[in-house]
Image: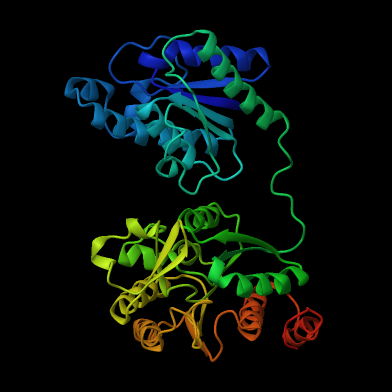
C-alpha cells in the first residue's frame, strides 16, 4: 500500500518531490505519477507519462507534437484516472495527494473522483478558494488552498506542502475502521427544506427498525454524492422522496444533479421507493439573478439568497417524462409513491405554490411514461408529502424491501413512534 502522488512533473516536480520526501521519512511508501506532457520531468516518476497517455488511448509523443495544452490536460486526466483505478483494484492505494494549478487540479481531482468513498483524497490547489464543485462533484475529496502558486520551494510553499503531506499522513494513520457492519441495512434518503418533515418521520421509523439512514440534501451535489455512494456499493436501498434536482435539470435551475439523476440505483439493481418531493420548484439565487425569461413567472423568495420558481404544467410533464425514462430502465424493484395532496410544504392549499393543475400534469406524465413497466409499482396517496401518513407509508414500503420480519410485526412497532399514526 502507498500514497499515490499526482502532478505535472515538468512544472511541479520539485514541489512533489518535497512531499514525497516527507511521506517517506514518516514511513509511508509512495507512487509518483507524472501527468506532464511537454517539458522533461524534474524528478523520476514511478509511473511515467508514457504509461499515463497510453491509458488514455494515445501516446506522450503524439500529445507533445500536437502542442495543444487543452487536449494534453484532457488526455492526462483520462489516463491518470485509469491508472489510479487500476492501482486501487490491485490494492495498492492507501491515499492520493495531488498538487497543481488549473491543469493539475483538473487532472488530480478526476483521478480522485474515480476512487471510492473513504479513500483519503487531498488536492493542494491554487483554485481551492473559489468555486470547487466541478472538481469535487459528489466525491469526499478535500481541496486545500495553496495560497501562492506552487512555483519553487520557499518558506511559504514548504509550509503548505508540508501541511498537505501531514494531512494525508493523519488521514492514513488515524483512519477509523472501514465498512464496519452493524447488522442493519444502509439506506440513502433525499431531503429538502420543504420535505424535511416527511423525511425525518420516515427516517425515525427506519432507524427504529434497525436501518442506518444516510440523508442527502437535494442541492445538486447532494444527489450526486448519494448516487456516487450507490455506485460504490455503499448503499443497499434508496428512499428517494425528494427528486427536486430533476426540476432544476429540466427547467434550468442552479441545483441540478446532472442528466443521470435517478439512474444509479436502477443500474445497481437495488430497491427504490421514490416520490416527487419539491418538484413544484426550480432554484435560483437572489431574486436579481433569476433569468429574464422567468421574471414574470410565479416566484417565491425563500430568503435573500434563494428564489424559487413554480413549475408549470408543461414543465411538469417534461419532468415526469424524465423520471419515467430513468425509473423505467431500473434493474431492481421501484415503488413510486405520488402525494396527490401536494409535493412540498408550499404546494398545499393556502401556500404560494399550490397548483393542482401543475401537479396533475406531473402525475399523468409519470403514469403514461411508466405504463407497462413491470418493475415499477405506482401508488397514489391522497395526502400531501409531509403528512405523517404519507411518511409512514413510504417507510413501510422501504422496510418491506429491507427488514427480514413479517409485515404485521413491523406495523405493531410503528404505533410506538411519536407523532405517527398507528
| Quadrant location of the C terminus in the rendered image | bottom right
The structure residue drawn at horizontal position 72% and vertical position 66%, both measured from the top left corner, is: 211
The answer to whether one can see residue 93 in this image is: no
x and y, in percent, of residue 198 in the image: 61, 75
Above/below status of 247 relative to 22: below
Front-lying residue, 285 or 42: 285
Frontmost residue, 245 versus 14 = 245
Residue 188 screen position, x and y as percent? 60, 63
Left or right relative to 351: residue 387: right
Q: Quadrant of residue 47?
A: top left
Figure check: 170 above or below 395: above
Q: Which residue extends farthest bottom?
A: 382
Asked if residue 16 can be seen in this view, the reply is yes
In the shown orientation, is residue 151 left or right of residue 412?
Answer: left
- Across the whole image, how many numbered discs are drawn on residues? 0
The percent coordinates of residue 18 (x first, y second) are 53, 12
Query: As drawn, which residue projects farthest toward the left?
Result: 66
Residue at the (28%, 67%) spot, across then down: 294
Tell me the quarter of the picture where residue 195 sits: bottom right
Which one is in front, 209 or 278?
A: 278
- Location of the N terminus (image quadrant): top right
Nearest the viewer among 104 and 316 is: 316
The answer to whether residue 320 is above or below residue 161 is below
Q: How is the image coloured?
A: rainbow
Residue 189, percent across and down?
Answer: 59, 65
Amino acid at each position: 500500500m502507498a500514497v499515490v502522488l499526482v502532478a505535472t512533473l515538468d512544472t511541479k516536480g520539485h514541489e512533489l518531490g518535497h512531499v514525497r520526501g516527507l511521506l517517506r521519512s514518516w514511513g509511508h511508501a509512495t507512487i509518483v505519477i507524472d501527468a506532464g506532457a511537454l517539458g522533461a520531468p524534474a524528478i523520476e516518476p514511478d509511473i511515467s507519462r508514457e504509461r499515463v497517455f497510453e491509458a488514455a488511448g494515445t501516446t506522450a509523443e503524439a500529445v507533445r507534437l500536437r502542442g495543444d495544452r487543452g487536449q494534453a490536460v484532457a488526455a492526462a486526466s483520462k489516463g491518470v484516472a485509469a491508472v489510479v483505478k487500476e492501482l486501487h483494484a490491485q490494492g495498492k492505494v492507501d491515499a492520493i495527494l495531488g498538487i497543481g494549478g488549473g491543469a493539475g487540479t483538473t487532472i488530480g481531482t478526476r483521478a480522485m473522483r474515480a476512487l471510492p468513498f473513504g479513500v483519503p483524497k487531498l488536492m493542494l490547489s491554487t483554485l481551492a478558494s473559489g468555486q470547487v464543485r466541478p472538481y469535487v462533484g459528489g466525491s469526499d475529496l478535500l481541496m486545500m488552498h495553496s495560497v501562492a502558486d506552487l512555483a519553487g520551494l520557499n518558506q511559504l510553499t514548504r509550509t503548505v506542502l508540508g501541511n498537505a503531506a501531514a494531512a494525508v499522513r493523519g488521514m492514513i494513520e488515524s483512519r477509523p475502521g472501514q465498512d464496519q457492519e452493524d447488522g442493519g441495512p444502509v439506506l440513502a434518503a433525499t431531503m429538502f427544506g420543504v420535505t424535511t418533515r416527511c423525511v425525518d418521520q420516515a427516517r425515525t421509523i427506519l432507524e427504529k427498525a434497525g436501518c442506518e439512514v444516510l440523508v442527502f440534501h437535494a442541492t445538486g451535489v447532494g444527489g450526486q454524492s448519494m448516487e456516487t455512494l450507490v455506485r460504490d456499493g455503499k448503499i443497499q436501498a434508496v428512499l428517494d422522496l425528494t427528486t427536486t434536482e430533476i426540476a432544476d435539470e429540466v427547467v434550468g435551475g442552479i441545483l441540478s444533479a446532472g442528466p443521470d439523476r435517478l439512474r444509479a440505483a436502477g443500474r445497481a439493481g437495488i430497491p427504490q421507493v421514490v416520490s416527487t418531493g419539491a418538484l413544484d420548484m426550480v432554484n435560483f439565487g437572489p431574486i436579481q439573478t433569476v433569468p429574464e425569461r422567468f421574471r414574470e413567472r410565479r416566484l417565491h423568495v425563500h430568503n435573500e439568497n434563494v428564489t424559487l420558481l413554480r413549475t408549470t404544467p408543461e414543465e411538469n410533464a417534461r419532468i415526469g417524462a424524465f423520471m419515467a425514462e430513468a425509473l423505467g430502465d431500473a434493474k431492481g424493484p421501484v415503488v413510486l409513491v405520488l402525494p396527490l395532496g401536494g409535493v412540498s410544504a408550499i404546494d398545499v392549499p393556502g401556500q404560494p405554490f399550490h397548483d393542482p393543475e401543475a401537479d396533475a400534469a406531473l402525475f399523468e406524465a409519470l403514469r403514461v411514461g411508466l405504463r407497462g413497466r413491470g418493475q415499477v409499482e405506482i401508488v397514489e396517496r391522497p395526502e400531501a408529502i409531509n403528512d405523517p401518513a404519507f411518511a409512514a407509508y413510504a417507510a413501510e414500503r422501504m422496510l418491506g424491501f429491507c427488514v427480514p420480519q413479517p409485515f404485521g410485526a413491523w406495523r405493531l412497532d410503528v404505533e410506538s413512534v411519536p407523532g405517527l399514526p398507528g
